[in-house]
Image (cartoon, grey):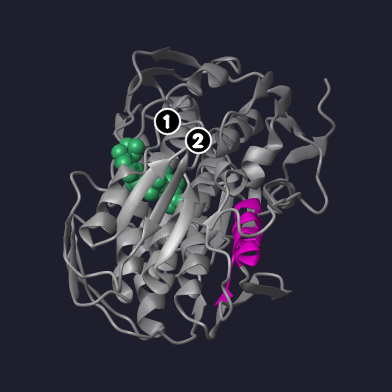
Amino acid sequence: MADARPFHWEYHPETPRPETFRIEGGRPLRGTVNVSGAKNAALKLLAAAVLTGERCRLENVPEIEDVRVMAEVLRDLGVVVDHPETGVYEIAAGDVDWLFIPLEAAAKMRASFILLGPLLTRFGRVIISNPGGDRIGRRPVNLHVDAMRAMGAEIEYRNGYYYAQAPGRLRGGEIRFPQVTVMGTENAMLAATLADGHTVIRPAAQEPEVDDLAAFLCEMGADVERTYPDTIEVHGTRRLRGATHRVLPDRIETGTFLISAAVTGGTMRLENAACKHVGALVEVFEKVGIPVHCADTTIDIDASGLTPADLRACDIETAPYPGLATDLQSPTCVLLTQASGTSRVHEGVFEDRIEWLGELRKLGARIDIEDTHHAAIHGPSQLRGAEVSISDLRAGASLILAALAAQGPSLIHGAHHVERGYENIDRKFQQLGASIARSADTA
Ligand code: UD1
C-alpha cells in the first residue's frame, strides 16, 4: 500500500517568522486577553471528522502550527479540508484513497497517531509511522496499539511503521489500560464508535478535551458516554453523520496567561475561559497567595501590589486530570521562582520534563534538579534577562514567562516550538503591554 503512490508529503509554514523572541522584561501585564480554542481538543476533533464521509464544521479552532500540520496530513490522505475563515475548519472525508501516515508527518507532530483509530475503524487498514514528537522523554504508543488489538485489529511493526488492518469490522470489547493515557483513551473511543458491539474503556482519561471529543462524536450520531468518572462506554454504530462543533477553551493557555499576570505583578481578565478546567492551578494560586476570581466564562487575576514576600512557596505534583496538568508544570515552576521559600516539584506524568529547568536557571532561578521527576525551587529570585533556547512547546512558553518577569533583555531561540501550540502568543502579550518581538536568530 505504501508504494502505491509516489511519496509527496511536504509541509512548510506559509510565512515562516523569525526564530527568536526578543523580550525586555519587568513590565506588569495589564488588560484583557481572549483564550483560544484548545489545541489538544482541536487535533482530535479534526481526526474524528474522518469517521464520516459527510461534511463536519469545527469552530474556535486555534490558529496554530499543529493544527496546520494536522490539516495537511488529512489533505494528503485525500480528505477535503477547507479553512473558510479564521478559527473555522470544514472537513469532508468522502474520498480517502491513501491510508498512509508518513514519518515526515508523524515526526512533526506526535498527535498524528490519533488517526490510527478512526482510519482503521472506518477503512479497515492504515500504515502509520511511529511518532517522534516532542523531546519530552520516552513517548511510546504501545497502549494505543494494544487497545486496537483488543478490538480485533492485526498490527505488525516493521521499519518504523505500524501496518494495521481489521479483518471485517473492529469488535467492541473491554479495554483495560495499565495506566491513564489521554490519546490512548481517545484512539480507543474513536475506534469503538464504528466497531461491532459494546466497548468499555477503563481507566479512561478524564481530561476535558476527552469529553469535548465525546460530545462531538455524539453530535455525529455515536453512542458514547462517560458512565463513571474513569469509565467510557461506547455502543458501536455502522455510520456517523456530519456535525458542527465549537472547540472548548484551552486550559493550558489559560494557565499560561494567569501565571504571566502573577509573575509580572499585573492584573488581567481572561475571556472565553473555563475556570472549572483549571481548578488544580487555582488551588496553587490560593496556596501561594494570589487572588483569582472565576465567573462563567471569565477569570480575573490581580497580582498588582504583591511582593515576593507576600507569596508563599508551595509543593506541586503533576498528575492526570483533575490533578495539575503536566503541561502546566513548567509555567507553574516560573511562578514558584517568585515565592518565598522552597517549593518541591514532582513531575508525575513524563520523564525528562524537568530538564528544561536548566534553561530557567540561566535567568537567575535557584533550582536543584534532583532526578528525572523531582526538583526543588528556592525563591524568591530576582530573574535577570538571558539568552536561552527552547526545547519543547511548554518549556518555550515558560521561558517567555520568565523573561517577561526578568529585569533586562532576553533572547529566546526556537520560537517554532511555541508556535506549535500557542496562537499569536507574541501579539497577545504585546496587547497586554509586554515588550516582545520576533527577530532573526542572532544576538
Ligand atoms: C496528551 C497531550 C499532552 C499532555 C499529555 C498528558 C495531546 C495531543 N497531548 O499526550 O499535551 O502532556 O496528554 O496530559 O493531547 N504512555 C505509554 N504508552 C502509550 C501512551 C502513553 O507508556 O502508548 C505513557 C506516557 O509515556 C506518559 C503517560 O503514559 O508517561 C501519559 O501519557 P498520555 O496521557 O498518553 O499523553 P498523550 O496522550 O500522548
Instruction: Return the x and y of residue 415 as percentages of the image width and height.
Output: 70, 37
| 191 lies left or right of 111 | left
* Circle 2 SS class: loop
Compared with 211, 92 (above or below) is below
Q: Which residues are magenta?
A: 58-77
Amino acid type assigned to the residue bearing label 2 in the image? Leu
Q: Is residue 215 visible?
A: yes
Magenta span: predominant SS is helix
* Circle 1 SS class: helix
Disc number for residue 310: 1
Q: Local crowd at mark 2 within 10 Å, few (<14), some, or many (≥20)?
A: some
Q: Quadrant of ligand 1?
A: top left
Residue at the spot x=30%, y=61% of the render?
188
Quadrant containing the C terminus in the rendered view: top right
Contact, CB < 8 Å: mark 2 with mark 1?
yes
Disc number for residue 306: 2
Instruction: Return the x and y of residue 372 as percentages of the image width and height.
Output: 35, 20
Amino acid type assigned to the residue bearing label 1 in the image? Asp
Q: Is mark 1 within 8 Å of ligand 1?
A: no
Compared with 401, 293 (above or below) is below
Compared with 6, 320 (above or below) is above
Q: Is mark 2 within 8 Å of ligand 1?
A: no
